[in-house]
Amino acid sequence: MNGEAEYALKKTDFRSWFMGKLLMGMSWPEYMRSLVTPFNVVAGAVLAVGLPVIAVRFLFGLESVTHASYEYPWGLLLGWGLFGGVPLSATGFVMATMYYIFGFKAYKPLVRLGVLTGFMGYLFAVLYLLVDLGRPWRIYYPMVVQFGTASVLFLVAWHVATYLTVQFLEFSTTILEWLRARRVRLWAVRITIAMTIAGIILSTLHQSALGAMFLLAPGKLHPLWYSSYIPQLFLISSVYAALAMVIAVSTLVARYLRGATDETYRGNLDRLTLGLGKGAVAAMYVYFAMKLVAVAHADLWGALLTPYGYWYLLEILGFVLAPALVLTYGVKAASALAVRFGAFWAVMGILVNRLNVSIVAFNWNLPHHIEHIVPPWTEVAIVGALLTLHILIFRWIVNRMPVVREEPEYKEAH
Amino acid sequence: MKKDKGKGRSRGLSRRAFLGSMALAGGTAVLGHPKKAGGSENFTGYPGSYGMLTDLSLCVGCRSCEKACNEANDLPEPETPFTDSSVFDEERRTTPGVYTVVNRYETPGGKVVYRKIQCNHCMEPACASACPIHAYTKTPEGPVHYNEDLCFGCRYCMIACPFYVPTYDYESALEPKVEKCIMCLGRIRDGLKPACAAACPMGAVTFGRRDDLLKLARQRILRSPDTYVDHIYGEKEAGGLNWLYLSPVPFEQVGFPKDVPMQPPISYAKGFLAAVPSVFVIWPAFFGMLYAAVRHRENHETEKEGAGSEEVRK
Ligand code: SF4
Ligand code: SF4
Ligand code: SF4
């Protein structure tokens, strides 16, 4: 393999196209060598453990790898992958709404990143679900075979499926630019607004529907988390989850995938981070207030002075109010660093809340509840493997496609 | 942005027109849903449906019902024979392959009380309202029927059931399914009693029309007020069950789940479900208008600033 000879064949040659698009302009040996990094070694190890565990699950059933029981049909796979993953993937809908509908044009450098993060998040939520479903090959049943229209999960299934498609279409302009498919791309740009509005409807509904799923289990979910406001709480927290997630992801991209970014992205990032932080903090205070209203509404002040009450207080003080204060400070002092710190914290808080609702506070009054909170290592290994794949694919796309940089050809074309 | 201004305007219009029609289509598609939904408005059970009445004061823990259920439903051989009373040493629950179990409780008052557990065949079952594929049906006869050919194994029914009834064979990789008591639907349709009711030597399990069973239960309480606590479990619980219970001791003492609401669980989600269709109509209209307003403002600004719509760049 002689590099100069390769380039001599020029653009029409498939091999140079392949190297340009997929190997980022390197030759195979160069590319392979570039893959040996500490991160990739760790990722490889996680996959080497987790992928066989996934195989075990499909060969020997859920029993072999999860704690799933008759009392606790759902565990970490859904608690993390679906209930935690979906609010953090509201990035697509929140960024597209800000940019296309509210006309905050300044956020352009982050719109595609938000859409990609959202699309990937939903895609992986579905993958977690596929691992957890008893008969995953029937996943399309609620769409095709029979409709359980009274089921909130039916809504979630439909919305996640259609919204996944919507987000794919939203992101398709980026893919088409990467492939230099000019004409198709123009067509894709035209449907963006329609897709954005469809995305708003679908997102607002299924973000709240994920919470509404638990409305069906009064008496099973601890009263502090079971609230008639749970759909609204899930929705509003998904808004700040999205803003915080965009801050977090854009920070990681700027740090670890610097080569994929352009001047516009790097130059604007701090300023945009402050703006996003401002939005997030507003939503967080609203959410915090609603959490208190929910406690007051059901008159649960007494319940706060129980072990579960302390845990609840830790959640709302330590993982909502505290990061909100950090963000407030960051915005006031115009410190992007503080805003980033607060954003990572807020993202953690979302995970804490969703895991609390779906696992920690669910069936809280059954004996041996504590044992069920702790997942077996195999379930953790599956989550680790899927998370690693998520990051690897995300990185693969960001490195190649114009997500956090602009293709010179399309500069003015948005 | 400036160069396609003219085009942008007409394009914006056609987009809005497209959105409008989409909203209409989406709205009507969904507006149709709640009415024919499985958890329909204020469903209070099928009139004349059958039910069962378990009288805990009569049960002696002979486990004949367990045995009859096992045979009638072709369930796998039990680990310990049905005559072995050592099973009472621990509290058991139903499993796939075991649709009903009898447990023994020693109450604080020193009484020994046996209790048979199985699906309660709720009048407005949470399992059925949870299932996104409608794999569960409340039959007019009373039993809640589950169709394994539809189930994709999400197990939301198990999350929703306030009585922790549905079980799932997690060991199966290829054909896992939910299993629970079916109230011997086939036997009822053949004009027979459910197997457990037919087998009980003490008459502790009575089969009949739910309305008649309620009367019977009330009579028993009236006739021997010292024997029973004054409550028919299942008359109101979870919106009403087709399987009713009488007990000589408070129901909490014999393992009936606490915190079961008196309304059908689906009633808590009805408000949410009812709000869904309007979102399909209001959101597109609202955001369509907003988008139009923003576009208008932008065009306006562009005109004022001349060529200066470079806010994106700098
Ligand atoms: S007891 Fe549970 S499984 Fe049985 S009908 Fe009621 S909700 Fe469904
Ligand atoms: S596990 Fe099966 S029966 Fe139960 S809700 Fe899911 S699809 Fe329906
Ligand atoms: S009604 Fe039939 S299926 Fe249900 S417990 Fe009795 S014998 Fe078993």
Image (cartoon, helix red, strand yellow):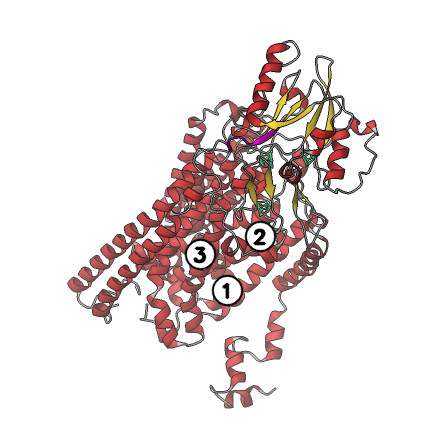
**Residue that appears at 45% across and 57% down:** A162
Q: Residue B110, can we see it? A: yes
B304 shown above or below A344: below
Front in this rendered view, residue A180 or A135: A135
Q: Which label number is shown at residue A257? A: 1
Could you say where residue B120 lies in the image, as x and y percent from the top left? 61, 32
Give the residue type that dot 3 points to: Tyr
Q: What chain does mark 1 sit on?
A: A
Q: Which label number is shown at residue A168? A: none
What's the distance in space between the residues labelled 1 and 3, CA to CA?
28 Å
Segment colored magenta? B45-51
- Residue B47 is covered by the magenta coloring: yes
Q: Earlier in the sequence, mark 2 or mark 1?
A: 2
Q: What residue did someone put label 2 on?
A: A129
Tell me whether marks 2 and 1 sit on the same chain: yes
Q: Dot 3, crowdedness within 10 Å: few (<14), some or many (≥20)?
A: many
Quadrant housing the C terminus of chain B: bottom left
B113 shown above or below A378: above
Q: Secondary structure at mark 3?
A: helix
Residue A215 is left or right of residue A284, and the answer is right
Could you say where residue B234 lies in the image, as x and y percent from the top left? 57, 25
Front in this rendered view, residue B27 or B73: B73
Q: Secondary structure at mark 2?
A: helix
What's the distance in space between the residues labelled 2 and 3, CA to CA?
16 Å
Q: What chain does mark 2 sit on?
A: A
